[in-house]
Image (cartoon, helix red, strand yellow):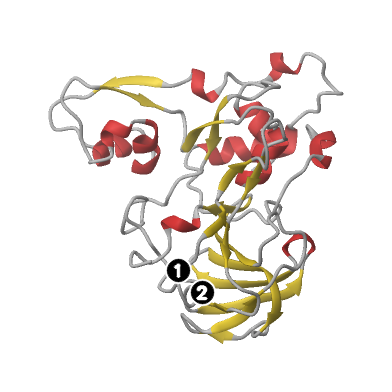
Amino acid sequence: MILSLLANLRMTKSSFGVGKYILGQFSLWLYFCIGTTLTLAQSPNLSQNCPTPALSRLQRHRLGAGETLASLAQKYHLVPETLSSLNPQLKKGKAPVGTVILIPPFNGIRIEVPQGATWQDVAKAYGIRADILFEVNGCTQKPKVVFIPGVVWTASAKRSVDTYTGLTHYPLPHPAKIGLDYGWQSHSPGQQTFFHSGIDLLAPEGTPVLAAASGTVLLVSKEGPYGFLVVIDHGNGRQTRYAQLSRFQAEAGQIVQSGQVIGYVGISGRPDIPETHVHFEVRFQSPVGWVAQDPKLHLPANH
């Protein structure tokens, strides 16, 4: 796989990619890439074989009278969230007539890559193969601002990203301080950045860890950096993950209710911070893996 030599760089809790994608017109192209991607070693002039970068193929559209986010999404065969993420002026559903907006070639999001991060870092953060990302972005070897295909909310979501909670219970008995937040992190200036795919909620060792929503326990196991890990399936391609536990209070196959105790806070595995905590993730299923979303977007509004 392209950039496979980068696999030894420090990564944390990203190998379990989770997420919900809308691939739209991109799906056939993605299938083609999976079967035909080249390696840098095989082709020193690989950039000549790559498509034009997705961000270089943005169309410009001037809003006409009566056009809305929904009608534009239908016109260009995209989901509304793709357009609103690329054009913040559309987040309320419409913008003034004459406003020029950008239209991407397929669903996805634009991100700024932290200095020093590699394609492998981005791949593990978003659950899409590094070689595919490499080609979608025109085979640029040092990514800075890139397009991540398909990382958007579903068109059938009842609420937008800004208001969607999804979960019905906090994963601890009481709201807790975040010891390490979701997203790109660096422990100190000059260190390699890494992607943290959840939030570390600080709590004393032995504090009960609670199911954030009803569902079926898929996994109860010790899993490398995660340590003692519980994974709960909530249906519709959604999961929550609870890691660094000291012990379990759940079994694989068990049906649990929102707020039910499933384990206890600890510091097992290879945690990123020294304090006792629960590492909590929210993940959505995609055709090419599982991608993490910021858990804070999903927690109940009263916490």
> What label does residue 110 carry, if any?
none
Query: For numbered disc 1, what is the local secondary structure?
Result: loop
- Of residue 25 and residue 159, the one placed in the foreground of this image is 159
Q: Is residue 12 left or right of residue 217?
A: right
Determine the residue positioned at 55% across, 66% down: 239
Q: Amino acid at mark 1?
A: Pro
100 or 9, nearer to the observer: 9
Label 2: how many Cα within 10 Å (few below 14, some 14–19, many 20+):
many
Left or right position of 136 against 151: right
- The residue wearing badge 2 is 172
Q: Position of residue 66 (x, y in %)?
A: 13, 32
Task: Answer left or right for 110 relative to 160.
Answer: right
Image x and y of residue 118, in percent: 70, 31
Q: Give the residue drawn at x 68%, y 38%.
A: 188
Q: Which residue is mark 1?
A: 175
Q: Which image quarter holds the C terminus?
A: bottom left
Q: Is residue 211 visible?
A: yes
Q: Residue at x 28, y 39 (%)?
A: 91
* Label 1 CA crowd tier, 10 Å (few <14, some 14–19, many 20+): few
Pointers 2 and 1 in contact (C-beta within 8 Å):
yes
Which amino acid type is marked by label 2?
Leu
Location of residue 101 (image quadrant):
top left
